[in-house]
Amino acid sequence: MGGTLAAELGQRNGIGLGMQTVVEGMLTSVVGLRGTGFASIPFDSSPQILAARLGPSLHFLPYRRLDVGIFSDAGLATLDLFRANRTLYPVLGAGMTMDYALSSFFALHLEFSGQAGIADQGAARVIVLGSGLVGLGVMF
């Protein structure tokens, strides 16, 4: 969980709470494939976004106590699903991660990421979302 800053370029923007689930499988010692589920809960009238993305990741210090990585992904998102003007649109995302191993099974996960997409609701709306998240990772 963490904080988000959502903006529709030239329109609504605001802060909210971001919740994310990531499942990542390592294909080699440094390259992984990750699936991301993301939900923003706005505190005001900013866009409410639910997204599912898939893409590669690159780890610079794999299998060490401290690992740093980058990722990029793409997928679909819904904008304002629980409001009258809801729509489905494509998104692209990218970011960096840092994992600190607390034990052989648990890690503290920090992530800074952004996603952007163009939603069509009668007019093209560019939606940009930045987030900083912290959570507990389980490794097996």
Image (cartoon, rainbow, N blue to C red):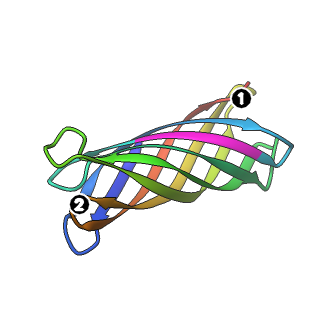
Amino acid type, mark 1: Ser
Q: Position of residue 73 (x, y in %)?
A: 59, 53
Query: Which labelled disc corresponds to residue 103?
Result: 1
Amino acid type, mark 2: Gly
Quadrant for the N terminus in the image: top left
Q: Give the main secondary structure, helix, strand or loop, of the magenta stretch.
A: strand
Q: Position of residue 16 (x, y in %)?
A: 27, 50
Q: Is 35 covered by the magenta stretch?
A: yes
- The residue where tag 2 is placed is 14
The one of 55 and 97 positioned closer to us in this rendering: 55
Q: Residue at x 64, y 48 (%)?
A: 55
Q: Is residue 116 left or right of residue 9?
A: right
The one of 37 and 66 positioned closer to us in this rendering: 37
Q: Compute the Cα span from label 1 to label 2.
A: 37 Å
Q: Is residue 14 left or right of residue 138?
A: left
Task: Select label 1 or label 2 by which is in front.
Answer: 2
Q: Residue at x 24, y 54 (%)?
A: 47
Q: Earlier in the sequence, mark 1 or mark 2?
A: 2
Q: Residue at x 44, y 54 (%)?
A: 90
The one of 117 and 132 positioned closer to us in this rendering: 117
Q: Quadrant of residue 35?
A: top right
Q: Give the class, few, some or many, for how many residues have Cα within 10 Å of label 1's Cα (few <14, many ≥20).
A: few
Kindly state the secondary structure of the residue where label 2 is placed: strand
Tell me: residue 84, above or below residue 25. below
Q: Is 54 covered by the magenta stretch?
A: no
Tell me: residue 73, above or below residue 82. below
Quadrant for the C terminus in the image: top right
Q: Which residues are magenta?
A: 32-38
Residue farthest toward the bottom in the current orientation of the protein: 10
